[in-house]
Image (spheres, rainbow, N blue to C red):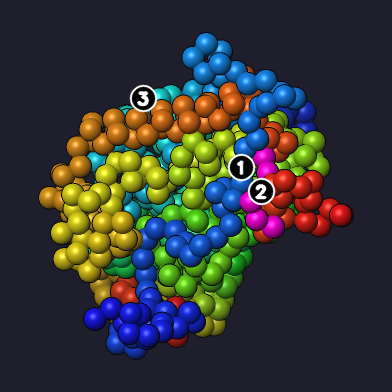
Amino acid sequence: MATLIDLATTPVRELNQALHAPEATAWRVLNPRGAHAVACGIREDLAVDIEGHVGYYCAGMNQRATVTVHGNAGTGVAENMMSGTVRVRGNASQSAGATAHGGLLVIDGDASARCGISMKGVDIVVGGNVGHMSAFMGQAGRLVVCGDAGDALGDSLYEARLYVRGTVKSLGADCVEKEMRPEHLAELAELLKAAERDEDPAGFRRYGSARKLYHFKVDNTTAY
Amino acid sequence: MEPASHGLRESATFDRATIHAIQRAAETGVYDIRGWGAKRKLPHFDDLLLLGASMSRYPLEGYRERCDTDVVLGTRHARHPLRLATPVTIAGMSFGALSAQAKEALGRGASEVGTSTTTGDGGMTPEERGHSKHLVYQYLPSRYGMNPDDLRKADAIEVVLGQGAKPGGGGMLLGQKITERVAGMRTLPVGIDQRSACRHPDWTGPDDLAIKILELREITDWEKPVYVKVGATRTYYDVKLAVHAGADVVVVDGMQGGTAATQDVFIEHVGIPTLAALPQAVRALQELGVHREVQLIVSGGIRGGADMAKALALGADAVAIGTAALIALGDNHPRYDAEYRRLGSAAGYFDDYQDGRDPAGISTQDAELAARLDPVDAGRRLANFLRVMTMEAQTLARACGKAHLLHLEPEDLVALTIESAAMARVPLAGTNWIPGEGL
């Protein structure tokens, strides 16, 4: 039986304080009504179900917990996540999973601009589309997009790997399409399974860094 | 032959440094990247003088009457504000830009005198945390090495929007300094020329910043002071917006502030001098009714107790040093002159922090060079320097009749030049004229 917290009557501060020193492992949060910083900074292996829409930075810097948003999420959901799982049943606003180092972020709907910006090891699976500049400066981790990607996908990419099933409006600087080898199909299959999705990995294309901007060179002037 | 003695005349417009810069660009096809801060002459604290006590005010005895130096930072919202023994702190400098030994020495020196040091763009090292009594953890656009465990270990959090050497620019760290350890901490491939982001990835503008600060407070259970650091440009507005966003402390870094690697054109041509920024920041805080409630730290070219006393008199609560701290550790020491010259520089001129071949073992990741810097000795030198700075400032404050460094006030200052009078909003020496405030 989950511990119930109703944000209509309880401040977010009290919720987060309770989640930082938890006396239960399962939590259910009612009436988030777009509140910011809900369930951020958790360190324990908790299950937190949020029944409604959340504002900015839900599950920010998550460690170990499984946080599910049964609604839409505002800017920066699961930003800088280290481990655990964050799932958004609806859509996510911009900068979903920004700078996250680890764990799994699943967005069942669409994600807006800059999804996975500066990602540092997180895995992100988006059921729908992602907006422009997604995976900008992505350093590590995998971004899976089951729908389409907007402009400048993977701009200034480092070592993050990107998989897109639909169309890519344009690729950003230094991002190129790459060969889909068996190991990539295998890791993609694992990611889709972890996200509870049934798309066929064979229907995706892979994108990564051309690694041409890794060193300052006069030939790259237009890219700087 | 000495050209000038034969009537040859050097161009003021195309001086030798300018000619060399054009030749270098023509040869290499890339812009000059270097360390240090602005080297051009700028209006600075040297252009202000303190008015010692005489008939109308009486001074304090240097050896008998106290002149306190303690300062508390982060009193507005944080449950655990920083209590420092002296209002001079160590500015943010990254492990990566600096060697682990240098970071440890900064921690040791600062801790010995009871003040804080600051991480940089690259995360928190155990050496630094272990040797720093008060450690400020920077929250930068790149978020390299950013993790909530380190956030909780910090004594304060500094949200960095920019730095004086390059307001509007992101960090740089060239490949020769991206060793396996540095790369690992930043999640980057070894040896690449790293460009840090210049904008935060998950917020834009002051309204978002307020929510970001709220999140950082929530994650750390409202314990830690949250600083907001800006490079000095539109300082009056930036400070007001930082206060509205919820900052406990605002850090303003003038264009003389140092960097480990930035384009020379950026360092010399973007931002405003510390002297011009500080009064704007104070005015913003005063107009919001939060001067002294939201503390102000000023950095950028602070070199000693006189600069510190004058900055405090203009309304800062503390100053921060970076370049001066590195010099105290051993940077640019004449003992390395021959080695500096082999690198095409000289003691007193060396600014190639980006290059990773620092003979002093400070701005390097080369294990042999870094081993030259003994963190204990270097830390002691820094502590000595910080003590001297503090004593110098006390000397000046006592002369002005102040029992605490923070009692210094604008009325204790006059300006030597019209420019500095206009910027600092204090009268030109010997007059009661502040440019822009009537005749």
Chain letter for the residue marked with disc 1 in the picture: B
Query: Residue, x 23% and y 31% (percent of image)?
Result: B376
Front label number (3 vs 2)? 2
Discs 2 and 1 carry the same chain letter: yes
- Is residue A150 toward the left or the right of residue B341 in the image? right
Residue A134 location, x and y as percent? 52, 68
Q: Distance between the residues labelled 2 and 1?
A: 6 Å
Q: Nearer the viewer, residue A188 or A134?
A: A134
Same chain for mark 3 and mark 2? The answer is: yes
Question: In which quadrant of the rendered view does residue B74 lie?
Answer: top right
Whether pointer 3 and pointer 2 mark residues with C-beta atoms closer than 8 Å, the reply is no
Task: Check the residue under mark 2 and report the chain it is in.
Answer: B
For label 2, count other residues whose C-alpha is less than 10 Å away and answer few (under 14), some (14-19) or many (20+).
many
Q: Does the magenta stretch include residue A93?
A: no
Q: Is residue B414 magenta?
A: yes
Residue farthest to the top, as pictured: B64
- Mark carried by residue B415: 2
Which residues are drawn in magenta?
Answer: B413-418
Report the residue at 23% width, 56% height from top: B358
Residue B238 image offset from top left, x and y in percent: 68, 53
Lower position in the chain sequence, tag 1 or tag 3 = 1
**Circle 1: element type:** strand
Are the residues at dot 2 and dot 1 in contact (C-beta closer than 8 Å)? yes
Q: What element carries label 3?
A: helix
* Chain identity of mark 3: B
Horizontally, residue B315 falls left or right of residue A155, namely: right
Q: Nearer the viewer, residue B252 or A159?
A: B252
> Which label is found at residue B112?
3
Residue B297 showing in the rendered view: yes
